[in-house]
Amino acid sequence: MTASGRARVAAHGAFAYERNPQPLPELGPWTSDLERLLEANERRARRDRLAMIRIFEELHGLGYRGGYDGAGAIRRLGTLIARRRRSCR
């Protein structure tokens, strides 16, 4: 069992994994800036797109003071936003 999720055994012996939503406390106030950066990045030509570390550096330049380990949250949120956009098309 982990802090973020649980493995449960069903009646027939199969495992089911439940993951709790991950909070983004440090990233919270920067979510709109991150969305804007990700949208701008998505509009670029594929070869000109920035890696997540570069997006993190741009966000840091805007005043975000979280560490790069916070970039995991940036990556998760970026993936979430991209999936949401794809499903709306």
Image (spheres, rainbow, N blue to C red):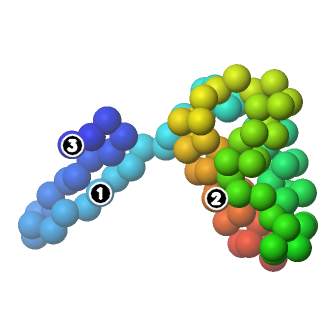
Where is mark 2, residue-wise?
A: 79
Where is mark 3, residue-wise?
A: 1
Marks 3 and 1: CB-CB under 8 Å?
no
Task: Determine the residue positioned at 81% across, 73% down.
Answer: 47
The percent position of residue 7, horizontal first and vertical second, equals 22, 52
Q: Is residue 22 left or right of residue 5?
A: right
Task: Determine the residue positioned at 50% across, 40% down.
Answer: 22
The percent position of residue 50, horizontal first and vertical second, equals 78, 58
Residue 48, numbered circle:
none
Task: Determine the residue positioned at 75% across, 39% down.
Answer: 57
The percent position of residue 24, horizontal first and vertical second, equals 59, 34
Q: Secondary structure at mark 2?
A: helix
Discs 2/3, front: 2
Residue 83's image quarter?
bottom right
Q: CA distance from mark 1 to mark 2?
A: 21 Å
Q: CA distance from mark 3 to mark 1?
A: 10 Å
| Other-residue count near label 3 (Cα within 10 Å), few / some / many at <14 / 14–19 / ≥20 | few
Q: Mark 3 vs mark 1: which is more N-terminal?
A: 3
Q: Mark 1 vs mark 2: which is more N-terminal?
A: 1
Where is mark 1, residue-wise?
A: 17
| Other-residue count near label 2 (Cα within 10 Å), few / some / many at <14 / 14–19 / ≥20 | few
Quarter of the image where the C terminus is located: bottom right
**Which of 14 and 22 lies nearest the eye of the viewer?**
22
